[in-house]
Image (cartoon, rainbow, N blue to C red):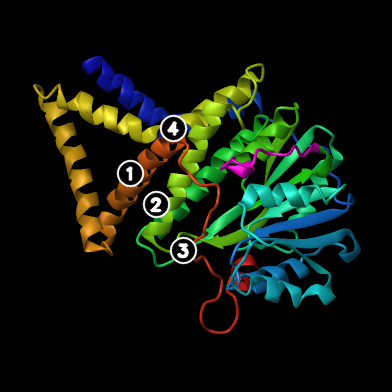
Amino acid sequence: MEYAFWIIISLIVYTILGYALLLWLIASLFYREEKKSKQDPDFLPQVTLLIPAYNEDRVISDKILNSLALDYPKKKLRIIIASDGSTDKTNTIVSSYQAEGVLLWSNPQRCGKISVINQAMHQIHDGIVVLSDANVMYDKQAIQTLVQHFKDPEVGVVSGNVSLIKTNSPVGALDLIYQAYENQIKALESKTGSVTGADGAMYAIRREDYQTVAKHVILDDLVISMNILRKGKRILFESKAKGKEHSVSNVREAFWTRVRVVAGGIQAIKTGLGMPPWKQGMQIFQFISHKILRWLLPLQFLGLFIANGFILEQTFYMVFFAIQLGVYSMALLAHFIGNPVSILSAPYYFGIQNIAAMLGIWRGLSNSQSVKWDKGERYFKNGHGNDISEKHLK
């Protein structure tokens, strides 16, 4: 068990920190000059901004106004809201902007985000498609910054730099830290070749590269982007293409978001959908290190706890076991408090993320995760008149 303990703890350290450090070392030694695409700031292709939406009436007007304000030639930018059977005022609000060129494509019944994307893509025949979540506000230069990379035929996907605005949630600040760390990893992956999947909040593809995705797929952004990588094209991370969204507004949202992501990850492992081919060695290494090990992290922590429990003879192992018990106890205490003080926030975040991931693993294995998704209330209205995205995007 002592060997198992050290193997597991090494794996955990690698998953959380080691991969990023190794990636940085590889980038520093072998990619001192970033493998840049053949960018052309004057390259202005036809662009479709596709925004899938389900019951987004509290944010959709802000998103449309943000999209209309983008600094891209109006004749070359088409804005489409693909409503997935919305039952609130989403469709009515979108229809009020038709005179300004905003198109509404509406499903009478809800069928799930990936089905809506498939249907929309069948009606878009050329150019660049930028996919966006309804609650994400873009910097004015975001579209132009994304599409300039497509002058290079080797580039298949460009993922944007979406950062988070802190909410009053007890896990909001930690959500920001996690997102910032993820973006740093994506930047390193992009420098060494390709990012391991695009961010669904902001990414661009060529319409001709899109492959229809099975309607049961949970992680649409991962599968869509990795299907293009499988063709031998690159997925880039463009740090200058910026957007903002709120961090999780409550613990429940953080929990169910993690459940969905991990369930979709297990689905990807089981089916091979979204995984790079074995001949793409660097991408396989990145996918295992960045995705698979991260999805399976709660099993690593569980294994560490069990292995540690069998080797309590030495003081070191007793102390380490006590630390684990302390962290789990603090997370449990935070749960019962409901709105934990700052000292409990990290254990609480750690606890809910790992419990959610365990549930996600089960749902992925049992095929019980729905493809339909209710987004949390990450709204840009601050209650004082205007949306707060303007000040954050300047």
Residue displayed at 48% across by 30% down: 292
Q: Nearer the viewer, residue 315 or 153?
A: 153
Which numbered disc flags the more N-terminal residue, 1 or 2?
2
Amino acid found under the numbered disc labelled 2 = Phe
Q: Is residue 288 above or below residue 385?
A: above
Q: Nearer the viewer, residue 69 or 224?
A: 224
Residue displayed at 55% across by 32% down: 268
**Residue marked by disc 3:** 166
Q: Nearer the viewer, mark 4 or mark 2?
A: 4
Which numbered disc flags the more N-terminal residue, 3 or 1?
3
223 relative position to 291: left or right: right
Q: Can you see residue 29?
A: no
Say whether marks 1 and 4 touch (CB < 8 Å). no
Amino acid found under the numbered disc labelled 4 = Leu
Which numbered disc flags the more N-terminal residue, 1 or 4?
1
Quadrant in the rendering for residue 339? bottom left
Q: Secondary structure at mark 2?
A: helix
**Residue marked by disc 4:** 365
Amino acid found under the numbered disc labelled 1 = Ile
**Residue marked by disc 1:** 355
